[in-house]
Image: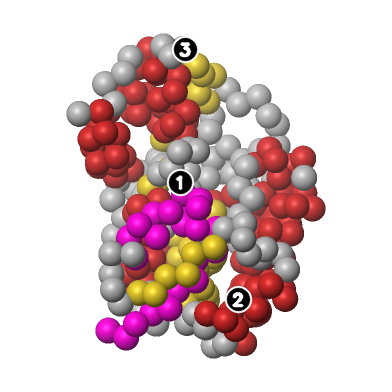
Amino acid sequence: MRRNSIWITGAPGKIGTSIMRRLKKNVDYRIIATGRDVDVTDLESVQQHMNIYKPNIVINCASVSDVYSCEENPVEAFRVNALGARNLATASRQDNAKIIHLSCDDVFSGEHAIPKTEFDVPTPVTVYGKSKLAGENFVRELNPRHLIIRSSWVYGGGDDYISYVLEKAAAKEPFTAAFDKISTPTSSDLIARFIELMLDKKEYGIYHASCEGACTRYEYARMILYLTGNDISLVSGTFAEKEGLTTTTLLENLMMKMTGVFEMPDWKEELRNYVKVYINKKES
């Protein structure tokens, strides 16, 4: 296999870290990882980086992903999630590089509990979802060699829902989780495995990459507590307080099933494996 030169933006984040951890094991990959040191919202800086390192694949993990922060700072959300994506798509096309762009389930409204395929029309209602869709559109329009990957409730880093639940458990502090927020937890490791598989494939377009099955936030929290040997009674159910934010976002991995390139496991199975490798192993 030829040596791939891969630029990962937003490398310190959950998915970026998992991709780095996975790809660094393979000597056929030359990894260029950047975080805040390269401003993706500055086209000149992005082009300069492309000119220096000449990557043939760009993996864009850079994102403002806090939903409430995006609502409060819409300009910054669009700068990073849309303008940043535009700059990377423009620069990668100029160098004939493939771009793999990470997106999310929030591009859908969350108003209906019907799984959305890659062929459903996105109708985002949050600033986060709108900015991510704008980024998708730029990537699609500006670089034909694009792969857009949407996922849901991604975990696998210090700043994720699992860490939040375990902090509450360690402090024996009761907390609430929503009955009316429904989606599918998906590990960043699993997404990284899928991305590695797709690096050399001539597959382009949009792919959903979400675990199979679904759960409420309350069920998710209970499962985390159960798998880590904590008291499941610490969590109690409630209903989401914020109006107008996405509540139910289910992704159907239709492109995966059509092409047969990858098979996503059930969310409980993947969560069990993650806890075994990254949490229970640390405590043993």
Residue 24 in the figure: left or right of residue 149: left
Q: Earlier in the sequence, mark 1 or mark 3?
A: 1
Q: CA distance from mark 2 to mark 1?
A: 28 Å
**Residue at image x 77%, y 45%?**
73
| Residue 72 location, quadrant | top right
Q: How is the rendered protein coloured?
A: secondary structure
User: According to the image, label 2 marks what residue?
Assistant: 49
Front in this rendered view, residue 37 or 183: 37
Q: Residue furthest left?
A: 284
Pointer 1 local density, CA inside 10 Å: few below 14, some 14–19, many at least 20: many
Q: Quadrant of the N terminus?
A: bottom left
Q: Earlier in the sequence, mark 2 or mark 3?
A: 2
User: According to the image, label 3 marks what residue?
Assistant: 174
Work out whether residue 167 can be spotted. yes
Residue 15 magenta = yes
- Contact, CB < 8 Å: mark 2 with mark 1? no
Write the start and end of the magenta stretch as one range. Answer: 1-23
